[in-house]
Image (cartoon, rainbow, N blue to C red):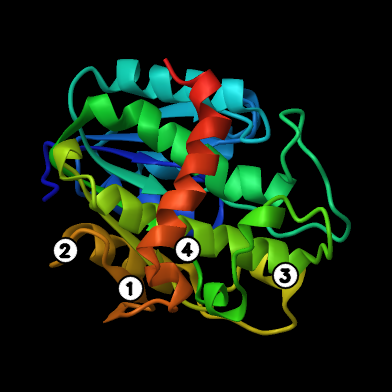
Amino acid sequence: MISDESTVIVTGATGGIGLQTARELVRRVRHVIVQGPEPANRVHPVLHLLTEGAAKVDYVSCDFERLDDVAAAARSMAGIAGGPVDALINNAGVPGTTTRQVTPDKHERTLQVNFLAMVLITEELLPALADGARVVNLASATHEMTDLDLADIELERGYDAVRAYARSKLAIILYTRWLASRADRGVLPVSLSPGVISTPLLHAMFSVGGVSVRRGADNVLAALTGPARPGDYFDDGALVEPSAQARDARLGRALMDYALDAVRPHLS
């Protein structure tokens, strides 16, 4: 449970739900470490918004398209924290692109930024997390629209922007449940769909409206502070069951064999 003495890390915190979540946290905790892809000199206005509370705020710039940068950022965050980290909110994410793109690490971009980077940053930070720390992973209700074909996890065939995004979010739920099964890690991981929130990411892929980012941040904070069991999934604030594939422990183990192979060379 977080308190006014807690240290919390929020990724993807220079806009949208992540920024609003950080703005709420600076009024509640002692130290907030925020991450974004922009260089520090380009986010001064954003960081100024985080002076609204009493918390100490530190910014770590990191490009999730480069896994070495992700690992280095995680190590930097652990050093900046200077002690146990009480919560990690994995919010960073991108929409699928119109055409398939590959990162310098040779992974499909949406999969790497939304999923592999999350796995890497979480695994790298696990030793720095306090006993019982909560890990909140932002997924999406779109995970119900797709399935995960491990034989073509990188979507080399039949690429589609929405499919790429939805599959990355399905992978996030599977990772959350896999992490929850590892009792020796001493953390409480949960995942959530924050709701249909009006953000640039939403509008990049879907011709729908959305509600305020404050609603999304409220749902994140509820998943962070409310009652939860390891592996729980919340949709717009309600505890629900994710899709059948998202609950498939065997698929989750196979996915994590792939994911850990991909991130292991970058781990300390």
Q: Which residue is mark 1?
A: 234
Who is closer to the viewer here, 200 or 173? Answer: 173
**Place of residue 24 in the rendered image (x, y in percent of width and height, measured from the top left):** 32, 55
Q: CA distance from mark 1 to mark 4?
A: 9 Å
Residue drawn at point x = 65 percent, y = 70 percent: 202
Residue drawn at point x = 40 percent, y = 60 percent: 250
**Place of residue 253 in the rendered image (x, y in percent of width and height, measured from the top left):** 41, 51
Who is closer to the viewer here, 21 or 129? Answer: 129
Q: Which residue is mark 3?
A: 162
> As shown in the figure, which amino acid type bears the numbered disc 2?
Arg
**Compared to 137, does 31 lie above or below?**
above
In which quarter of the view is residue 69 placed? top right
**Place of residue 48 in the rendered image (x, y in percent of width and height, measured from the top left):** 47, 38
Q: CA distance from mark 4 to mark 3?
A: 14 Å
> As shown in the figure, which amino acid type bears the numbered disc 4?
Ala
Mark 2 in CB contact with mark 4 (< 8 angstroms) = no
Q: Which tag, 3 or 1, sits closer to the chain's start? A: 3
Viewport quadrant of the C terminus: top left
Return the residue found at the far right.
99
> As shown in the figure, which amino acid type bears the numbered disc 3?
Val
Q: Which tag, 4 or 3, sits closer to the chain's start? A: 4
Who is closer to the viewer here, 196 or 14? Answer: 196
Which disc, if any, is residue 229?
2
Q: Which tag, 2 or 1, sits closer to the chain's start? A: 2
Number of numbered callouts drawn: 4
Left or right, residue 82 beside residue 102: left
* Mark 3, secondary structure of its residue: helix
Left or right, residue 98 beside residue 211: right
Mark 2 in CB contact with mark 3 (< 8 angstroms) = no
Q: Which residue is mark 4?
A: 139
